[in-house]
């Protein structure tokens, strides 16, 4: 976050008998905002003396400015931007090389990883300013970078490279939203980085509002969004800033608290898996209970089924399939058992620098495939709103080398040398370094979205409030 500019020093010297007090860094950082608030207050108070109505409006404005200062500033910036700057010129995608999409029958999830240091990586870590420290592995001290140079090659067709210009034209005037846990946030960050090269400097912005994080591509009047809902339904872990809870409890019959944010979105991409794997039984709050402490424990697969019944019913009853396309990302693997890939002396995913390159049979990484099958069956049985399953599981199974490992943050701090020396306890073998594997997930998502796109599609009038 850029530091606030300090007020310029006075050009006239202070009297010798009265030295000018020097503001502390903390106080000087507040000066611009305080000056702005004071100026606004003086103007509004002067107007308030002339009209009781103005007095009421002024009081409301000041209260809003104090309570929601950042949001008010964002609204002003984005609204003024509409008038000061034109939209990006419509790009004639017919001038690009022809886009050859794979046939619908081609299984994009079946294939192999091919080393490619010519066309990859699709962006540089240091050039994507919106990445969080959790996934900036090079900046966090990772000594190798070969994980960035592996391209996914399906067995029976070709996977188009991600073309940011073509993608943003498809997104013009539209909303795309990832919904789920931190792995969907990992993929959202990847997509933001993939599109940045075609966006003008100063015309892109991230705005956070509770569980919703919105990337504004202003010149395309498009948004790429992430909504935190690790179980999809309501739970006691829904606060994106405070979710490290020992006893996680879900409400499988309650979804509207989250789903109200999904209305009007053009592309919805869901996931939920890793948060289900802590225990064999899931704590479920009773339907008519008043407190989270009033809950039962039910088998994981039963609770998962109840959640997806609620989720699929909501989609069918509330979404217009002519407007909204729905996707579901399958299991992203956890690499914590090195004996599974022939390294019995390894420590989780630490010090792994190459993918698994033996493709004769799939790895057994102890996924709960009952959950995978349940989602696949729900997707097939949807009555009104089609759900496209994006199978990332098998291809990602091979990528033991691409996790953040010990080159990540924990509780807001970079791991210490002592912590890095203990990967059994501290290695993050869930999330992925960027650039990396989630870029390929987005390459497949890009392919599926463009396969669905129609030249007659219209912009979405219901962009999120700015």
Image (cartoon, rainbow, N blue to C red):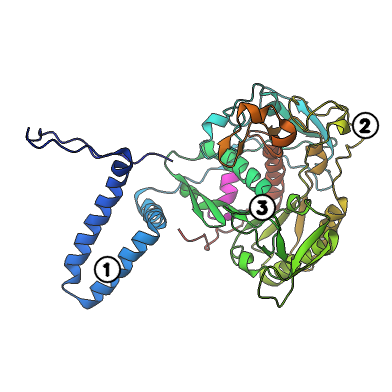
Residue that mark 3 sits on? 453
Foreground disc of the pair 3, 2: 2
Q: What is the C-alpha distance between the residues marked 1 and 2? A: 71 Å
Separation of residues labelled 3 and 2 (CA atoms): 36 Å
Q: Position of residue 213 (x, y in %)?
A: 54, 52
193 falls in the magenta region: no
Secondary structure type for disc 1: helix
**The N terminus appears in which quarter of the rendering?**
top left
Q: Nearer the viewer, mark 1 or mark 2?
A: 1
Judged left or right of residue 357, residue 406 is left
Q: Where's residue 179, x and y in %?
A: 65, 55
Sequence-earlier tag: 3 or 2: 2
Q: Is residue 132 visible?
A: no
The quarter of the displayed image where residue 39 is located: bottom left
354 vs 301: above or below: above
Image mark for residue 360: 2
Q: Return the residue nearer the eye: 170 or 297.
A: 297
User: Which quarter of the picture shows residue 401?
Assistant: top right
Q: Secondary structure at mark 3?
A: loop
Q: Residues within 10 Å of mark 2 (few under 14, many from 20)?
A: few
Q: Residues within 10 Å of mark 1 (few under 14, many from 20)?
A: many
User: What is the magenta range?
Assistant: 167-175
On the image, numbered disc 1 is attached to which residue? 58
Image marks 1 and 2: residues in contact by CB distance under 8 Å: no
């Amino acid at each position: 976050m850029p530091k606030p500019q300090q007020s310029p020093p006075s050009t006239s010297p202070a009297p010798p008998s009265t030295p000018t007090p020097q503001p502390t860094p903390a106080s000087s950082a507040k000066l611009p905002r305080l000056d702005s608030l004071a100026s606004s207050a003086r103007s509004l108070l002067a107007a308030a003396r002339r009209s009781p109505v103005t007095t009421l409006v002024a009081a409301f404005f000041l209260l809003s400015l104090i309570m929601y200062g950042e949001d008010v500033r964002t609204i002003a910036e984005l609204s003024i931007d509409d008038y000061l700057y034109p939209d990006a010129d419509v790009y004639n995608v017919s001038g690009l090389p022809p886009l050859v999409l794979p046939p619908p029958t081609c299984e994009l999830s079946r294939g192999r990883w091919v080393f490619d240091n010519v066309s990859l990586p699709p962006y540089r870590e240091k050039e994507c300013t919106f990445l969080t420290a959790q996934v900036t592995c090079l900046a966090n001290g990772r000594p190798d970078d070969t994980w960035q140079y592996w391209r996914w090659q399906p067995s029976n067709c070709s996977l188009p490279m991600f073309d940011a210009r073509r993608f943003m034209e498809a997104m013009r005037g539209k909303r795309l939203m990832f919904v789920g846990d931190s792995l969907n946030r990992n993929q959202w960050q990847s997509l933001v980085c993939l599109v940045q090269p075609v966006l003008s400097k100063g015309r892109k912005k991230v705005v956070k509002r509770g569980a919703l994080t919105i990337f504004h591509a202003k010149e395309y009047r498009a948004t790429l969004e992430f909504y935190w809902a690790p179980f999809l339904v309501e739970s006691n872990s829904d606060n994106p800033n405070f979710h490290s809870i020992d006893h996680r409890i879900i409400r499988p019959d309650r979804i509207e608290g989250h789903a109200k944010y999904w209305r009007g979105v053009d592309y919805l991409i869901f996931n939920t898996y890793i948060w289900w794997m802590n225990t064999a039984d899931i704590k479920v709050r009773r339907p008519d209970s008043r407190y989270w402490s009033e809950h039962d424990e039910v088998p994981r697969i039963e609770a998962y089924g109840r959640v997806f019944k609620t989720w699929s019913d909501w989609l069918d009853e509330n979404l217009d399939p002519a407007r909204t396309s729905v996707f579901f990302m399958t299991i992203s693997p956890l690499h914590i058992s090195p004996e599974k890939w022939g390294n019995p002396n390894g420590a989780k995913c630490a010090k792994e620098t190459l993918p698994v390159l033996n493709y004769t049979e799939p790895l057994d990484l102890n996924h709960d495939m009952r959950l995978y099958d349940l989602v696949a069956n729900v997707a097939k049985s949807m009555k009104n709103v089609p759900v496209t399953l994006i199978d990332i599981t098998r291809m990602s199974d091979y990528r033991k080398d691409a996790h953040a490992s010990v080159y990540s943050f924990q509780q807001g701090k970079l791991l210490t040398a002592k912590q890095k020396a203990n990967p059994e306890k501290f290695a993050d073998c869930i999330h992925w370094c960027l650039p990396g594997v989630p870029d390929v997930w987005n390459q497949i998502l890009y392919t599926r979205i463009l396969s669905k796109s129609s030249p007659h599609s219209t912009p979405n009038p219901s962009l999120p409030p700015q």
